[in-house]
């Protein structure tokens, strides 16, 4: 007796969607960041069609905002920020990628990607470096206390001096 291979019934909205990156950061002072790429992966045994929606479509150009992804393949979706003004700094916009089976209309899954415009890449890097230094100093304090009993006063003073220098910059 010949058995047909049955595909499981796909429930609307429950299919995991794989997109990288999950966050886009644009920098006003770095034009190379005004164009970014989202990669949509299809790990499934069937083709998917996709659609990209945006909360503020007037600020972005999405190249190929709709299309298809073959089984076990990926597609790149280019997103350009076209309204780089200071009034948009720090505003969080969202892109929604909806996927459905090639022959169906109902959305099987979706994933949201946040996008933010920041004023300066250099400023952001400086803040991240300061945060890393503070975290490292905190970790150092922890290790100093646990491995060198009695040296708390010296370590505390060094930490306080380092923190003071960082906050004065």
Image: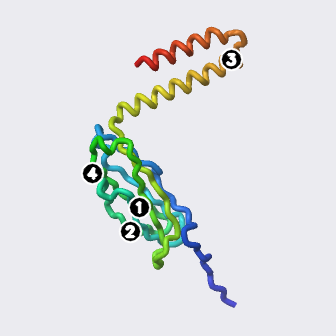
- For label 3, the residue is 145
Q: Residue at x 45, y 20 (%)?
A: 167
Q: Is residue 107 left or right of residue 148?
A: left
User: On screen, 61 above or below 14?
Assistant: above
- Which one is earlier in the sequence, the residue at label 2 or at label 3? 2
- Which one is earlier in the sequence, the residue at label 2 or at label 1? 2
- Which one is earlier in the sequence, the residue at label 1 or at label 3? 1
Give the SS element for disc 4: loop
In three-dimensional space, the C-alpha distance between marks 2 and 4, rounded to whole angstroms, equals 22 Å
In three-dimensional space, the C-alpha distance between marks 4 and 1, rounded to whole angstroms, equals 22 Å
- For label 2, the residue is 67
Asked where in the image residue 54 lies, by quadrant, the reply is bottom left
Give the SS element for disc 3: helix
- Which one is earlier in the sequence, the residue at label 4 or at label 3? 4
In three-dimensional space, the C-alpha distance between marks 2 and 1, rounded to whole angstroms, equals 9 Å
Asked where in the image residue 86 lies, by quadrant, the reply is top left
Q: Residue at x 30, y 50 (%)?
A: 81
């Amino acid at each position: 007796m010949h058995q047909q291979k049955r595909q499981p019934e796909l429930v609307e909205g429950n299919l995991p969607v794989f997109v990288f990156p999950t966050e886009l950061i644009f920098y006003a002072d770095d034009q190379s960041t005004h164009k970014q790429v989202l990669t949509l992966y299809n790990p499934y045994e069937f083709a998917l069609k996709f659609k990209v929606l945006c909360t503020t479509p007037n600020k972005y150009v999405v190249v190929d905002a709709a299309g298809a992804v073959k089984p076990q393949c990926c597609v790149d979706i280019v997103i350009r920020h076209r309204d780089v003004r200071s009034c948009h700094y720090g505003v969080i916009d969202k892109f929604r990628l909806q996927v459905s089976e090639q022959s169906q209309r109902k959305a099987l899954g979706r994933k949201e990607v946040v996008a933010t415009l920041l004023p300066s890449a250099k400023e952001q890097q400086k803040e991240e470096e300061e945060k890393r230094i503070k975290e490292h100093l905190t970790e150092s304090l922890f290790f100093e206390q646990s491995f060198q009993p009695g040296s708390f006063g010296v370590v505390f003073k060094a930490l306080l001096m380092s923190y003071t220098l960082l906050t004065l910059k």
